[in-house]
Image (cartoon, rainbow, N blue to C red):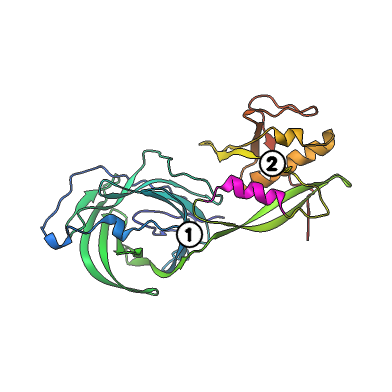
Amino acid sequence: MKKSILIGSAALVILLAGCQSESNSSNHNNEVNTKEKAPSVQSLKIEDYYPIKENTRYIYDGKGNEYASFNVYVDYTSENKLQERIDNGGTVMARVVELKDGKLTSTYSRAEAYYRENLLETKTGDEETLLMEPLKKGTTWRLEDSSVRTITNTSVDVSTPSGNYKAIEVTTEGSNGRNIDYYAKGVGLVKTSFFSEGMEVSSSLSKIEENAPLVQTITFYYPNIDDDKLYFKSRELSFLTNSITKKVLEDAYKENVPNTVEPVFSENTKINSLYLNKDNNLYIDLNQAFLTEMSAGAAYEGMILQSIVNTFGQYYGVAKVYLTIDNEPYSSGHIAMEKGGFFEVNVDGAIEIK
């Protein structure tokens, strides 16, 4: 069973293995309570303590829970947003973080996000303020679940496997326990700890990998016209921050086709769009060249379509795939789909190419 990540503060605290959770902490935009004035820290800015870096992986060592170790990769960025891929070995969560108006806010999160999809503009109304200016001791705000989050120190010594840091300390007090996050200038989150009823779960930064790609193993399906069977081969693909997923997959489907099978995409085939909607339905829209450059009878065409459905359906973890041509229902001389019609993933009898 896949294990979920519970995000309750600036990064993550894994509370219970196997617990399926969604982020439910939203900022109420309460007035900031600053208990002391310290002009020396007025120049501190959130962007210094949570920098947006591309092609970077942050690796954390954990204690106190099987899933306290995790890594974070930056999948997408914009001027003031980043989308993180948080992988604890049991599940993957996508989270969008925005730096705006003196706040660091988690604006969206999605569990079981094993695929790559740009979610930077996706919002559900469930937001959580992770850090708030002024970055000074005493700055306090309340979360939707009535937890209280406070900057409790601006220069605390933190030791981690990756080094020693002077960090901002942010403490969250809630009904389930206490969480402390530490942010270091120029780095970001360096440590997070959760305390509850004598239990402590902590995660500390152990390594930062720069100029690193995200590598995913993806299974591609192909038809064999000689024996009327589908074959598949798994390949490792590399994605950089802001790589366009549909383009990487499209190119990979055309390249290095095993010589024992037939190609699925012709030279001029393009993926116009590829996405999951809010109901987790997968849509793939191809251009007209896919049809015009296909030379296949009804049975062979069906095998080509099944190969596409299996490849993209499995990557996105769905059973149904809606396939269209230039935003119109799929229709060829042999196969015609009604509007809203879908194809189903079916890998029965497929043979692996060694």
9, above or below 121, in the image:
below
Q: How crowded is mark 1: few (under 14 residues within 10 Å), some or many (20 or more)?
A: some
Helix, strand or loop for disc 2: helix
What count of labels does the image hold? 2
Helix, strand or loop for disc 1: loop
Q: Quadrant of the image for the N terminus?
A: bottom right
Residue at position x 38%, y 56% in the image: 52
Q: Which of 329 and 341 is in front in this view?
A: 329
User: Going by the image, does 343 lie left or right of 124?
Assistant: right
Amino acid, disc 2: Val
Residue 253 magenta: yes
- What segment is highlighted magenta in the picture? 243-255
Q: Which of 128 and 172 is in front in this view?
A: 128
Residue at position x 32%, y 67% in the image: 198
Residue 265: quarter of image = top right
Residue at position x 30%, y 63% in the image: 183
Do we see residue 308 in this rendering? Answer: yes
Amino acid, disc 1: Asn
Q: Which of marks 1 and 2 is nearer the N terminus?
A: 1
53, above or below 344, in the image:
below
Q: Which residue lies furthest to the top in this view?
A: 338
Q: Which residue was labeled with disc 2?
A: 309
Q: Residues within 10 Å of mark 2 (few under 14, many from 20)?
A: many
> Residue 119: x percent and y percent?
46, 44
Q: Which residue was labeled with disc 1?
A: 55
Residue 152: quarter of image = bottom left
Q: Quadrant of the image for the C terminus?
A: bottom right
